[in-house]
Amino acid sequence: MNLSHLSSPVTVNWGITARCNFECSHCFSRLDISPELSGEEALRVVDILAGHNVMFVNYGTGEPLLREDLFPLTEYAVSCGLKATMNSNGSLISRETAGRIRRAGFHSVGISIDSADAKTHDAFRRMQGSFDMAVGAARFLKEEGVPLSISSVICRVNHRDFPALVSMAKGLGAHTIDLHNFKCSGMGGLNRENFDLSPPEWKAFYEAAIPMRRAEKGIEIAFDDPIMSLLGEEESGKLVAGSVCGKLSLYIRPDGEITPCGFIPVPIGHILKDDLGKVWNESRLLAHLRGKAAAGKCAGCGKFSSCLGGCPARSYAVHGAYDAPDPHCWADE
């Protein structure tokens, strides 16, 4: 039986900075002009997360390595019992930087690579040479003994070629490749027509990817899409139904505002001004997401109890309503 949510977030995804040296076509945060918290304020955030028994803090949003105090902040977070992870485009990770990452105590680092073909990746990331930089970063991290994952955004440029991505990630020594479903927020919303798949194409992708995940022994293939339950792919041991946002995880914007996830730009509190426990337990928006109603075609779907209408961020971005059916859903297509 699934829970509505846990007593505190397992993971807090922290947009440590909105600054980035890339201009990716799909970025949810590129339009974010939020000022970032000071170093002193960031240390207070760590104290708050540790005090509420958060297990993982994951840095993301812009390029975390542009944050000048990232390493001392991480050392402090690790000393407080948090497991620190990071998503990076890899462009700033030299062999020396990889050593600093290891010494800071990072639990793992995810490098974004969206195609095994360098030209395709560079075009999607809108940065010449970004593929070579990402691959080099992955190799430096492995040489330093930092656990490595590869993050890939599945979309029109790679949905048929993902087996090559998996093979490449395995060759780089990654323990996991995260095949993220395309979101429709920020630049992803503005460029949705160019990059998002149709519902039948999403179905075809998962029909090919799920058997590969079951058969693959050398690397974990991870997904984060509740509509997979339409194919009978309920995760064994899954704690919550539907999206994990607001049930297992929260997001902190660069300015400290709390939202259910990075793709739902609706503040529900401030990490330094509001009690995190109260936000987690009493937010009306979180309560809504945890108890979504079956609307539209979801009302007659036998899988609703598993997927809860799919990804609320996509529903909100496309339809303006959290309860609307996921625009990626292929049921009744």
Image (cartoon, helix red, strand yellow):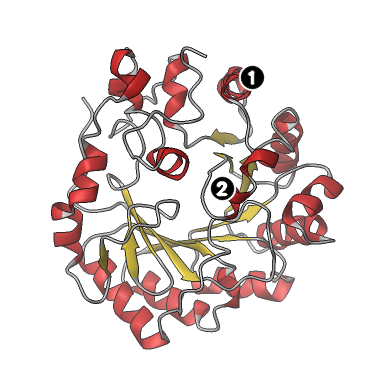
Q: Is residue 304 above or below residue 174?
A: above
Front-lying residue, 182 or 223: 182
Q: Where is mark 2, residue-wise?
A: 189
Front-lying residue, 147 or 5: 5
Q: Is residue 285 above or below residue 314?
A: below
Please provide percent x and percent y for residue 252. 37, 64
Q: Is residue 164 above or below residue 296?
A: below
Amino acid type, label 2 = Gly
Quadrant of the rendering where the N terminus is positioned: top left
- Residue at horizontal 68 percent and vertical 71 percent from the top: 21
- Residue at horizontal 42 percent and vertical 86 percent from the top: 39
Res. 239 image quadrant:
top left
Task: Tell me the element at label 2.
Answer: helix
Front-lying residue, 184 or 18: 184
Q: Where is mark 1, residue-wise?
A: 208
- Residue at horizontal 73 percent and vertical 27 percent from the top: 160
Q: Is residue 95 visible?
A: yes
Please provide percent x and percent y for residue 17. 51, 73
Q: Separation of disc 2 and disc 1 at Cα? A: 26 Å
Amino acid type, label 1 = Ala
Q: Is residue 149 visible?
A: no
